[in-house]
Amino acid sequence: MRTGSTNAILLELLSSSSLLDLPASRSFLKWAQRFEMRCEMIRARMRIVTLVGLFCGGFWVPSDAQVLFEYQPTPTDIPYDLTSGEGSGSVSIFNVELPASLGFPNNVQGWSLSLAHDPSILEAIEIDQGSYIQTVNNGNPPDFWQTSIEANGITIGSVYCFTGCASCVYEIPKEIAVIGYQTVAATLAGDLDGETTTLVFTPVGNPPVTNVMVVSGTSNPVNGQDGTVNLIPVLEPEIVRGDANANGVIEPLVDGITALNYLFVGGSTVSCLDTLDCNDDASVNLADPIMLLTWGFAMGSPLPAPFPDCGADPTDDLLSCDASGCP
């Protein structure tokens, strides 16, 4: 039974009782009445607190609420030449506001970005505006776009409009920058296994640039997901030197004619220039079909390796080979 109900019953009993004729009973009755009044005051205050909580609860904000943005780089594969170690590729950076962000979605006026990489494996070579940023200022690029390439990373600063005439929201991921990288050739040359390296959003430069998003003139820290770059060696197919038509068989007359057609007949193509380089001088010219025909019909010297079986070209040259007759 509730305390209020108990007090009311007690008061009723005392009021109707002959005990009220006694002085002690009258004193107890007065005390009980005062106690009941105090209990009612407490219950009233509790009801007020409950109503305030119900009506104001929707506007209550946790003390740790924050504006939450996140930079998201795309995972990227960069192929590199196994012999030279050279390769290049690009990484797109997206920005998104998380749904739990205070005031989501917020109007962004600008931002700064700082992204570090391993300088022993990668070198940043260019920084371009992302597709979304190119028209962020009422159809135009931002008023301020400043980039810096450091040995160990890159930095970007962007303000959409100096007069506050442009802002945007990032309720979904939007591309804000594209970073071009090239490999450190000396590190990767001859590396058959490839490498995986990580891009980290951390202060870079002197003075260091931090990752922040500007909302209503206030800088808010940005969380950044680590980016992954897979460096993958490209193995050129094995070849048989002299197999100009890449059919897997050395036929001096047929292959010699194929080489001559490539050199002197417009529109003739081959799938593997390395096989036409019969004398292995890192170029294709008239001397190559002559050497092949001499070997086939005039007991000339055998062609340099790989010959007459499939194998890797031992010479580091710029001659391409998309497909050969080797398995």
Image (cartoon, rainbow, N blue to C red):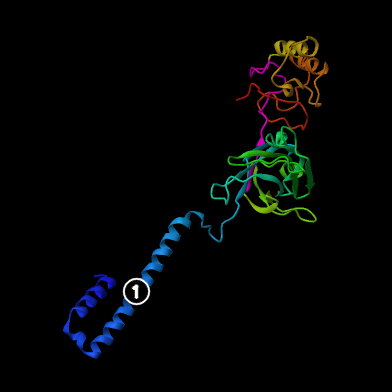
Q: Camera-side residue: 46 or 168?
A: 46
- Up the image or down, 297 lies above or below 157; here it is above
Specify the quadrant of the image occupied by residue 165.
top right
Residue at the extreme bottom: 23
Q: Residues within 10 Å of mark 1 (few under 14, many from 20)?
A: some
Q: Camera-side residue: 91 or 218?
A: 218
Element carrying mark 1 = helix
| Residue 229 on the magenta segment | yes
- Up the image or down, 5 lies above or below 266; here it is below
Chief secondary structure of the magenta portion: loop
Q: Which residues are magenta?
A: 225-250
Left or right of 242? Residue 74 is left
User: To which residue does mark 1 refer?
Assistant: 39
List x then y, in percent, for residue 72.
Answer: 62, 44
List x then y, in percent, for residue 31.
Answer: 31, 83
- Up the image or down, 155 lies above or below 50; here it is above
List x then y, in percent, for residue 282.
Answer: 80, 27
Looking at the figure, which quarter contains the C terminus? top right
Q: Measuring 72% from the left and 15% from the top, which residue is drawn there? A: 269
Residue at the extreme front: 21
